[in-house]
Amino acid sequence: MPYGNFHNPVGLVGRMLLSRKRAAYAALLRAGLEIALTPVDYVLSKVNGRSKGRDTESNQPLLFIVGPPRAGTTLIYQYVAASVDVSYATNLSSLFPKSLINGNCSPVVSGKHLRSYFGQTARLSDPNDAFHIWNRWFGDDRYRTKTELTDGEVDEMRMLFDSWTMREGKPFLNKNNRNCHCLAMLADTLPNAYFIVVSRDATSIARSLIRARKSVQGDKSVGWGLLSQEQHAHEPLGYVRDVCEQVQNVQRLITEQSASIAESRLIRVSYESFCENPNKFVDAITEKVDGVHRRELQMSELPDSLRPSPARPLSEAEEDAIVEFLAA
């Protein structure tokens, strides 16, 4: 687990241990295993060359889920991955970032498995946000990324996804909110990519981001998530203003980045409508994207509706500040 964007890694580990969240414990275990398996990963990458050597272009669709942090993108990722016949980067693959040993992409999923800890899922077969893949081109900063690639990087990205989808023989699905920062570039680079753009009520996102700052960073004044900022951290309730501006900036970014992408390649959904009828949304994906189908053997027991994560009100002063700053 890279710690570059985390204010106090030691404190974060302590908070994860106290969270009683299985996904948090699993993330810590994987962080240790990744270090221990580094020599094995290196040898395997030399032996199998899994991300190289493919000259043939794949026509399999790439499905990229993006949205603001704390908008429910991980839940949608988990549900779609269990419902549609796709491949995806698993938590196992994050232990082998060079060789990309991926494992099973057809896990049995029930409602109890649709849980996460700030984007981290629990089982080795569960979907991973694949920073270990995207960082090859975009670097380690989880909150911002570059919007242009060299010709060599473009070729490498295309080769990796062509190789992956040809090997798996099915579409590739991934969720990574940082990709909001470079949607237009990804659309140009990967012509077979489709973008599932998630939205959520702005007030709910702001509340959740403030809680995330406390849980992850240990301090509400320290930024967390895509386009986070600390410009007003020195002011009373300045962290609320920073979060509200973050919410607005991310929405503006998504609007700007998606403006140049054909609507035929965009699938929009709100977190609230997804929770109300997730199966309807899965049907919308299979109807819009050729080559994407439901799993023939549905071993998972997925709920027909989901209870939205409650965005509990904060203190009265924080709630008033959210209303004021989101209206600005």
Image (cartoon, grey):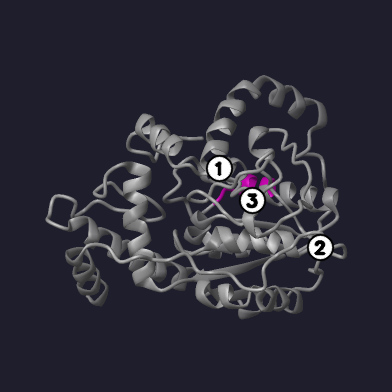
Q: Nearer the viewer, residue 51 or 283?
A: 283
- Left or right for 203, reference 234: right
Write down the residue under mark 3. 154
Write the residue at 24% across / 49% down.
221
- Contact (CB < 8 A) between labels 3 and 2? no
Amino acid carrying label 2: it is Asn
Residue 59 placed where, x, y %?
81, 62
Magenta includes 14?
no
Name the dominant secondary structure of the magenta segment.
helix
Q: Which mark is residue 145?
A: none
Amino acid carrying label 3: it is Val
Write the residue at 79% across / 68% down.
292
Write the residue at 69% across / 24% down.
42
Q: Nearer the viewer, residue 98 or 244?
A: 244
> Can you tell which of label 1 and label 3 is closer to the viewer?
1
Among numbered discs 2 and 1, the one appearing first in the sequence = 1
Marks 1 and 3, Cα distance to the nearest angstrom? Answer: 37 Å
Residue 66 placed where, x, y %?
54, 63
Q: Is residue 261 visible?
A: no
Write down the residue under mark 2. 59
Write down the residue under mark 1. 22
Residue 147 placed where, x, y %?
49, 55
Magenta segment range?
149-156
Among numbered discs 3 and 2, the one appearing first in the sequence = 2
Q: Is residue 162 above or below residue 205?
A: above
